[in-house]
Image: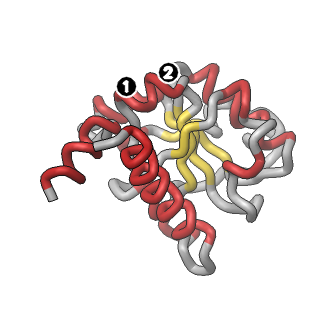
Amino acid sequence: MSSSYRISVALVLTVAAAFALNTPGGVQESELPAAHSGTDSPQHNPTSSKSAVAASDLPVDVTGHYYLIDVRDRNAFARRHIPGAVNVRLSNVARQPRRLPVDKTTPILIYGDSEEDAAGAVAALHRLGFSGVRYIAGGLAAWEDAGRMTASFIELEYAVVRH
């Protein structure tokens, strides 16, 4: 299987997940973990614990509820990521608006290798006018520790070849 075909399949799956989130009625606020308000809200202090959400508190089908952004480098993303996540390096979050939701009220969930990276991306997105941005406390490791599924491009290639 050619490399460009594998990337195209991954892109189609990512775009499909993003489309589902950007369609009316795609996300029901009542299904999301509780948001916090007040002067210590994530919009005023994106590194606060109120921006963080525990992996165990998230729905199993997280992409049905959030636009999911992985801020790690592309090699780490290719090896292992949460299914449906879009890979936007932390240094590129503000410079790649085409990889972000059109609707700035779309719930966004960010993860990386560290909480500092994820919180930095939360702050960058808040500066761009996005609301409802959270990050997974403990990053991808916490997601896996909670028994949640991950994917890789290697697994995707195998799945495409077998079917």
Secondary structure found at label 1? helix
Count of picture labels: 2
Q: How is the image coloured?
A: secondary structure
The structure residue drawn at horizontal position 56% and vertical position 67%, both measured from the top left corner, is 19
**Amino acid type, label 1:** Ala
**Quadrant of the image for the C terminus?**
bottom left
The label on residue 108 is: none
Residue 12's place in the image compared with 127, above or below, is below
Mark 2 vs 1: CB contact within 8 A: yes
The structure residue drawn at horizontal position 85% and vertical position 45%, both measured from the top left corner, is 128
User: In the picture, residue 67 is in which quadrant?
Assistant: bottom right
Mark 2 vs 1, N-terminal side: 2
Q: Which residue is mark 2?
A: 113
**Amino acid type, label 2:** Asp
Residue density around tag 2, few if under 14, some if 14–19, many if 20 or more, within 10 Å: some
Residue density around tag 1, few if under 14, some if 14–19, many if 20 or more, within 10 Å: some
Q: Nearer the viewer, residue 76 or 21?
A: 76
Residue 64's place in the image compared with 79, above or below, is below
* x then y, percent, for residue 122: 70, 36
Residue 45's place in the image compared with 6, above or below, is above
Q: Nearer the viewer, residue 132 or 13?
A: 13
Q: Which residue is mark 1?
A: 141
* x then y, percent, for residue 93: 72, 36
* x then y, percent, for residue 3: 39, 38
* x then y, percent, for residue 59: 38, 56
